[in-house]
Image (tube, rainbow, N blue to C red):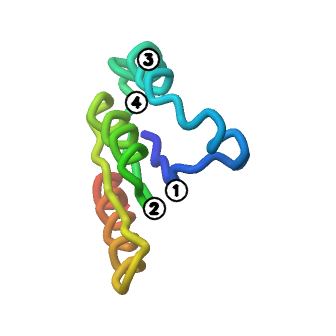
Amino acid sequence: MIVFISDGYPDDVDWFWNTGPNETAVRAYVDAQMAGSGITMYTIGIQPNVAINTVLQYMAAQTGGVYYPINTVGPGSQAQFDAALDAVADLLDC
């Protein structure tokens, strides 16, 4: 099991604005390396934007996991994050 938490932005901001996230490459990697591997990915998107949401949703769906979006705008974001972590922990019987 992998719990993947991302704000959807790479550390190299110049790269992001100049080339953008390569959704096709991420999907190809997930299909080739993760789908059918027996490894389940649970993805948590913090401050999700539309492009990243679809990638994180795809990663979870292709591996039998679940995608949890966390909207960091407005109240309740900490509660959303806690609920996502609790849901994943419940799957582990922690």
Pointers 2 and 1 in contact (C-beta within 8 Å): yes
> Left of 40 or right of it: where is 10?
right
Rounded to the nearest angstrom, the CA distance separating label 3 from label 4 is: 16 Å
Q: Position of residue 14 (x, y in %)?
A: 72, 45
How packed mark 2 is, by other alpha carbons closer than 10 Å (few <14, some 14-19, many 20 or more), is many
Task: Please name the residue that numbered disc 4 is placed on.
Answer: 39
Q: Residue most toward the bottom?
A: 75
- Disc 1 from disc 3: Cα separation: 21 Å
Q: Tell me whether circle 4 and circle 2 mark residues in contact (CB < 8 Å).
A: no
Where does label 1 land, which residue?
7
User: Label 3 belongs to which residue?
Assistant: 28
| Residue type at tag 4 | Ile
| Residue at point 32%, 56% (across, down) | 68
**Looking at the image, is mark 1 or mark 4 earlier in the sequence?**
1
What residue is rendered at 34% in x and 64% in y? 84
Q: Is residue 13 left or right of residue 25?
A: right
Residue 82: image quadrant is: bottom left
Q: For residue 72, which quarter of the picture?
A: bottom left
| SS under mark 4 | loop
Image quadrant occupied by the C terminus: bottom left
Q: CA distance from mark 1 to mark 4?
A: 22 Å
Q: Position of residue 22 (x, y in %)?
A: 52, 29
Element assignment for label 1: loop
Which amino acid type is marked by label 3? Ala
Q: Which mark is residue 46?
A: 2
**Which mark is drawn over residue 81?**
none
Q: Who comes first in sequence, dot 4 or dot 2? A: 4
